[in-house]
Structures are given as structure tokens and as C-alpha cells.
Image: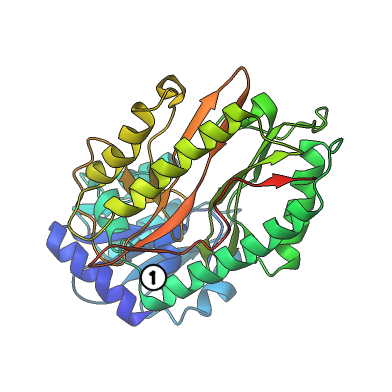
Amino acid sequence: MTERLQDYAALAGRLGVDAVALVPGPNFTRMTGHSFHSHERPLVILVPPEGPPAAIVPNLELDSFALLGFEGPVFDWRDQDGYAGAFAALAAHMPLGRIAVEGQVMRVFVHHAFKTAFQGLEIVDAEAEIAGLRLCKTPEEVAALERALALSEAALAELLDGVRPGQTEKALESRLIQLLFHHGAEDLSFGPIVAAAENSALPHASARADYALKEGDALLIDFGGRWGGFAADITRTVFVGHASAEAEAVYATVLAANDAGQAATRAGVTAHEVDDAVISVLEASPYADRIRTKTGHGLGRDVHEAPYIMRGNGQVLEAGMVFTDEPGLYDTASFGVRIEDVLLVTDTGCRQLTRFARGLTVVAT
């Protein structure tokens, strides 16, 4: 934890703030090596540019917090007393005029508690800078991602072996979740998307309990399991019994766009350039009116994090960044196709971390 604390202390110095404030979430877990729930009880670590950090911790979490080996004062509070006193004690110990916070993670009531305890406090949204410390993955983090992806792919392979007409999306979703844990997932990356027929054309569809798979249906599965704190995210679209000529053509177009994204990826290019290469393939096809989404997003401790692979994003890709390459085409009257792979940026190109077959697949034959 001491080494990671230094990352945030150095960031506080670069930002010109009195401290970086972290609350439970991916950055908190990266720094401490432990995961805490975000709930109605504020838990905050303050990391100044120099000197020891300080923390506000609910009393019921003290024993768990002690496992961190935290080197700094801890101001705890009990439910029956409220947390205002802990914030006031922190203010007396560490006067702060300007702090940097995670704008997408810190909740409003924690913001208000700081403003009440520290008169005139300036709170700066440094989401991009704080999350930026996670952008380039270490070899150990890449290995954790690969393990999360491998167990997820093993679960998918077993699921697809058992797909039959007449099964419901909800039944397949339930089976997939069971298989993820069976193959070693520590948690779900997110609630799986299991969608067939016209439901597969909704990028964030919910599984239906009243729809039974039919011959010729597209079946889109977007899911992932967690391992070592890192989230897998993979999508495959298969066809039940047979694939129509239209399905084959749409699938080939999406696969070509996915390939274009991989070919365009290397350190030094921008997220815009990768997305433009992908979307240009889709736009040049007869199915341009079915484009609904950007190419992808960063992947790591969060399922969605920087870099966001989209036109207009001039962020330069660096070796060690990881993102999804997931073009799709969606016709809400019939079906959708998405093919999602996970790419690790290298100096000369990229390495595909997903290993699952990418060609058109027909199940239940």
C-alpha cells in the first residue's frame, strides 16, 4: 500500500491540491488492495502531497480497515452519533483548502460533509487524473485480466454446448451465472446480457422469461466474470439451428469491423483513429443504418473506464492500455450482432486477450 500511496501523493502535488480524496471504488481498491462497499456510511482516505494520509472510517469497518496496515490517523464514527464529528476531527487535524475527488464516484452527501466541515473548501473534479493512474496495466494486472477472460470463456463454451430451441433467455442467463462461478469467478463483472431474436438488437437488453429460442434466432451473449479484482467483458453472437443469408452478411461485416479495429491499434494512435477505422467499415456496408454504438471502452478494475474508443476522443493510446473492440449492427425489427474482444495495446500493435472463436457459429445443430 505504501508504494501506491506515493502515486496518489505525487498526483496531489501535480494537481496543486492539499489532498486527493478516495472513496470505495476501483481507485480505492487499487491503492489499498482491499475492496469496501459504497453505502450510506462515508469512508474516505485523504492523501496529501507530503506526510501521512488520514481516513474517516465507520466504526463497524475498523477491524477490516486495520488489515490495510494504514499509516496515518483514523477518525471513526458510530451510526448513533453520525459522521459529522469525524469530519470535524479530520478538519482539526488536517486543514484543507483544496482537494481533488473522483467526480464519477464520490457521492453528493460526502461532498456536502466536506463542505460543512471545511469552510471555504474548494473541491476539484480530478476523475480523469485519478483514474489515469490505472490506464496502463502492469504485467500482473494483465495476467489477472487474462484469467478472468479465460474462466469466462470456459463458462461460455459450456453454455453454448447446451443451447437448444425452446430454452428461455432467462434460463440461459441463470445457467451462465452458475457456470461462471463453477469455473472460478470471484464475482460477476456485471449482470449478463442474454438476448435472442429482436431482443439482441437492444445493446443493453434484459433477458426475457417468456421468450423461447427458435430456429434461426440470433443469440447475443455479453458477460464476464471477475478474478483478482479485474473484470472480463466479452460478447459473442451465435445462431440457433441455422443462420440466414442476411445474418451471415451482417456477421461478416461486424467481424471485418472488429478486425479493422485490431489492425489500427498500436501505441501512438488516438482513440478517435481506432474508432474511425472500425465505424468506417460499418458505414461502407449496406447496414450503415444499424450502427448504434461506439467501438469500445477501457477495461480493468472497472468494466467501463478510459480510454473510450470513439470519434472525437484525441487521447493517445499507450502500451499497456486495455480496451474492448466491440462493433455491432442492430436492427430492432429482427436481430443484432456484436463481436467483442479485449485488446492490450503494445508498441507495435496489440495483443488480443480474448481467445474464444470469432467466426460465425451455429449452435443446436
Q: Quadrant of residue 224?
A: bottom right
Taking the image as drawn, is residue 39 in sight? no
| Residue 187 occupies quadrant | bottom right
**Number of numbered discs overlaid on the protein picture:** 1
Q: Which residue is painted at 50% across and 72% down in the image? A: 144
| x 49%, y 65%: residue | 76
- Residue 258: x and y in percent read 42, 46
The residue positioned 59% from the left and 45% from the top of the image is: 360
> Mark 1 falls on what kind of element?
helix
Crowd tier of the residue under label 1, counting other residues whose Cα lies within 10 Å: few below 14, some 14–19, many 20 or above: some
Q: In front here: 138 or 346?
A: 346
The residue where tag 1 is placed is 31
| Residue 178 spot, x, y in % from top left | 77, 57
Residue at the far front: name it. Answer: 245
Q: Say whether residue 113 is left or right of residue 270.
A: right
Residue 32 shows in this picture: yes
Name above or below for residue 314 compared with residue 162: above
- For the N terminus, the quadrant is bottom left
The amino acid type found where label 1 is placed reads: Met
Please, which colouring scheme is shown? rainbow
**Who's the residue at 40% across and 59% down the image?**
343
Q: Give how far across and how far down residue 20 sits, in percent.
A: 27, 60
In which quadrant of the rendered image does the C terminus lie? top right
Tell whether 177 sits left or right of 234. Answer: right
Closer to us: 329 or 150: 329
Q: Nearer the viewer, residue 335 or 139?
A: 335
Q: Position of residue 109 (x, y in %)?
A: 44, 41
